[in-house]
Amino acid sequence: MNKDYLDNTQIDLERLHDDFYGWKPPVQQKIKIATPVILFIVTFVAVVFAGALQYGVNPFTHLGEAYRGLPFALILMGILLSHEMGHFLMSKHHDVVATLPYFIPAPNILGTFGAFIRMKSPIPDRNALVDIGAAGPLAGFLIALPALIIGVRMSPLRPVASTGGLSLGNSLLVSLVSLLVRPSIPAGHELVLGPIAFAGWIGMFVTAMNLIPIGQLDGGHIAYALFGRWYNAIARLALIVLVVMGIWGWGVWLFWALIILILGIRHPSPIDPYQPLDVKRKYIAWFAMIILIITFIPVPFSGI
């Protein structure tokens, strides 16, 4: 068989691949830096101010005391940045065109609504789906867990309040960390998460929300790659669970379910949907699902 025949066969196969999938290899684009950097700086300042408020300091009237919010800001922003950079770097590894993280400043108790990246080209196969989907939650988890452990160790105790106030729910992991790190809490007292522990708690909460197995969430990527044809049933079941929890638990789940419905629960197919997952990716996918189970909080916030 001569070389010309092989070359022509290769060209025909590539043309058939492109015609069948309607896809061309992504053209490398210049990464925009200015807007992500500006948003990061603005969000960081907002989170520093939010952290200062947790210490009882009003940074708007006592700007010189705003530095007290730095521990909270450094940890929370570190969790969010590592999460999004996990997605970004793994996208680059698989030649998927993606933006740098866009952070969203917000006038709330955190100072932010989180961050996101945009992927501008298709994901090549199911193994890449697991890599890109799991890289963010796993990276954020690795920062949030030690922050939670150290923060719980440093958090103060107080007498159990008889009046209302904002209460944080416990996941299986938070309960386990509290039991191991602070096993002896006197009767009539409760642990009050300090800013460092609160940043770790938020990191776990964000991880769980992103791992919900629906649509374009990280968990949607992982579930589509792991469960294949069963994905649609799993996504619909997850959406029903969110609605039920929103009605009988934390009402914000209803809003989250609405957002997911608007974005769509179906998952787009990768370029090659038939390539099976290798053993390593199966372990990663199942580990991510375990993290969802141990970090999920049905009622994250209660009381006013």
Image: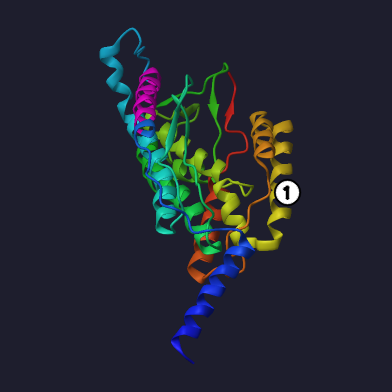
Viewer-nearest residue: 12 or 262: 12
**Residue situated furthest bottom in the rendering:** 1
Q: In this view, does 115 lie to the left or right of 250?
A: left
Viewer-nearest residue: 88 or 201: 88
**Image location of residue 144, percent across then percent down:** 41, 42
**Image location of residue 190, percent across then percent down:** 48, 29
**Image location of residue 117, percent across then percent down:** 47, 41
Q: Is residue 130 left or right of residue 20?
A: left
**Residue situated furthest front in the rendering:** 4
Q: Is residue 199 left or right of residue 275?
A: left
In percent of the image, x 35 and y 39: which residue is there?
A: 150
Q: Can residue 98 be seen in this view?
A: yes
Q: Is residue 245 left or right of residue 101?
A: right
**Residue situated furthest top in the rendering:** 61
Extent of the magenta region: 37-54
In percent of the image, x 54 and y 59: which residue is there?
A: 285
Which three-letter amino acid code belongs to the residue tagged 1? Leu
Q: Does the magenta stretch include residue 43?
A: yes
> On the rendered image, what quadrant is the C terminus found in?
top right
